[in-house]
Image: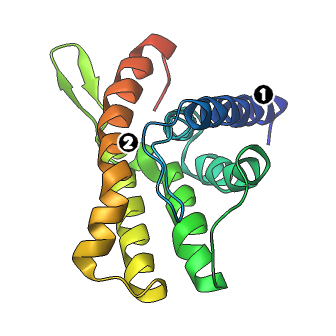
Amino acid sequence: MSTRDLVKMAMYLAMFAALDVISNAFVIFRMPQGGTFGLGVIALILASYDLGPRKGIFVGLVSILVQYITTPPLWFISWPQFFLDYILAYGIYGVAVMIPNSKAGKFPLLWGAIFVNLVRLSAHVVSGVVYYQSTWWGSFGYNGWYMIPTTIYAFILSSLLYTRLKLKK
């Protein structure tokens, strides 16, 4: 791994930390048992598009440690639930680059941003049903309350920033 890639990974993690602190300082959606409208996912999506899937997954996984530092506590009741709500939910951001993009005029549409957020939502819903004994609709309602807005703004902002940052695919 090159020094340049290490510096970029550190930059995306710092961006994630800063956006995470900002989104927790100005809370829009915060659920009582964890889950919030988080700006940090934009940094994870951009890391995937800039660094590729392997390094993007690594950045997503290290972001869990950053969350533990910036906004403790992490909510979990068992290790399989931790895998669903954290390892899968944040590691999946690294594969955003593998989903084909399209264009609306000159504007790129990063469909990977929608895909990874929907996988994260699915992981949270399954976790809610299995580990928190919620119904499917209850778990979807709880997690959808913050994940659907997160998906929408992540798609729009990452698509806008993609061209401005001139990231390679």
Residue that lies at the very extreme toward the front in this rendered image:
32
- Res 138 label: none
Residue type at numbered disc 2? Thr
- Foreground disc of the pair 1, 2: 2
Residue type at numbered disc 1? Arg
- Res 150 label: 2
Query: Residue at 42% of width from left, 88% of height from top?
Result: 130
| Residue 115 appears in the rendering | no
Tell me which corner region of the image, top left, top right, bottom left or bottom right, holds residue 51: top right
Question: In the image, is 97 to the left or to the right of 152?
Answer: right
Question: In the image, is 145 to the left or to the right of 8?
Answer: left
Task: Bin the neighbour count of mark 1 within 10 Å (Cα to Cα): few under 14, some 14-19, many 20 and up.
Answer: few
| Residue 16 appears in the rendering | yes
Does residue 161 sit above or below 133 in this rendering?
A: above
- Quarter the N terminus occupies: top right
Residue 54 lies, in percent from the top left, at 61, 53
Residue that lies at the very extreme toward the right in this rendered image:
3
Q: Nearer the viewer, residue 131 or 80?
A: 131
Q: Are marks 1 and 2 in contact (CB under 8 Å)?
A: no
**Label 1, label 2: how far apart the Cα atoms are:** 30 Å
Instruction: Provide the secondary structure element on which disc 2 rests.
Output: helix
Tell me which corner region of the image, top left, top right, bottom left or bottom right, holds residue 74: bottom right
Dot 1 corresponds to which residue? 4
Query: Residue at 30% of width from left, 57% of height from top?
Result: 144
